[in-house]
Amino acid sequence: MPTEVIFYTQVASIISFITALFVLYRVLVQQKDAVIQLLKERIAEKDEQITILKAQTPDALAAALADRIKIAQDEIARLRNDGDSHIKEIESKEEELAEIQARLGALSELIRQSDLVCPKCGDPLTRRQGYTIYGNDDQEADVEFIEYECGLAIDGNGKEVSRCRHVQPT
């Protein structure tokens, strides 16, 4: 075999190796870019979900209901000023207002009954942390530590760790 043939086959194999290497590199870069784009889309979706969930807090719902009550009251007053021609509309608005006030009352009662607010003064919950305690013979129990803005802290056994600052001790 002549040396020229061996030389050209080696050059061709080196060029084909480098070409395959660049093609593989290009494919990997495209895959990386696709993954980055997918992660950006997921982050944007999660941000939207967080925004929606923030808008559904009990305070936001109570504020929305209070706004609806104010609007309904203003509309009823405007209809009453217009005269007797709007009696049916006034009655329907008063029924709507009563329904909204009932929903607001139910929401307020639900918030009071939940542990989202301090049972003594009504301050909001600041921290809820669950943890596991271990006992003898591989026994374990899940307990929860609850702390409110006013300083009241309750351990997993329902025992007060610290007192509410807004209620005077007896």
Image (cartoon, rainbow, N blue to C red):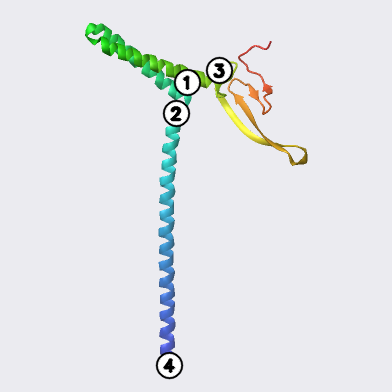
Taking the spot 65% from the left edge, 11% from the top edge, the residue there is 168
Residue 70 appears in view: no
Horizontal arrangement in the rendering, residue 119 relative to residue 30 (left or right): right
Q: Earlier in the sequence, mark 2 or mark 3?
A: 2
Q: Mark 2 and 1 residues: CB-CB less than 8 Å, in contact?
A: no
Q: Mark 3 and 4 residues: CB-CB less than 8 Å, in contact?
A: no
Q: Earlier in the sequence, mark 2 or mark 1?
A: 2
The extreme right residue here reads 136
Taking the spot 23% from the left edge, 8% from the top edge, the residue there is 82
The extreme left residue here reads 85
Front of the two marks 3 and 4: 3
Q: What separation in Å lies between label 4 and label 1 (alpha carbons)?
A: 93 Å
Q: Could you say which quadrant of the image residue 81 lies in?
A: top left
Judging by the rendered image, the residue that carries numbered circle 1 is: 107
Horizontal arrangement in the rendering, residue 130 relative to residue 139 (left or right): left
Q: Secondary structure at mark 3?
A: loop
Residue type of the residue flagged with mark 1: Leu
Q: 8 or 33: nearer the eye?
A: 33
Q: What separation in Å lies between label 2 and label 3 (alpha carbons)?
A: 19 Å
Q: Earlier in the sequence, mark 3 or mark 4?
A: 4
Horizontal arrangement in the rendering, residue 150 relative to residue 15 (left or right): right
Q: Earlier in the sequence, mark 4 or mark 1?
A: 4
Q: 91 or 80: nearer the eye?
A: 91
Judging by the rendered image, the residue that carries numbered circle 2 is: 56
Q: Earlier in the sequence, mark 4 or mark 2?
A: 4
Taking the spot 65% from the left edge, 24% from the top edge, the residue there is 154
Judging by the rendered image, the residue that carries numbered circle 3 is: 122
Q: Could you say which quadrant of the image residue 9 lies in?
A: bottom left
Front of the two marks 4 and 1: 1
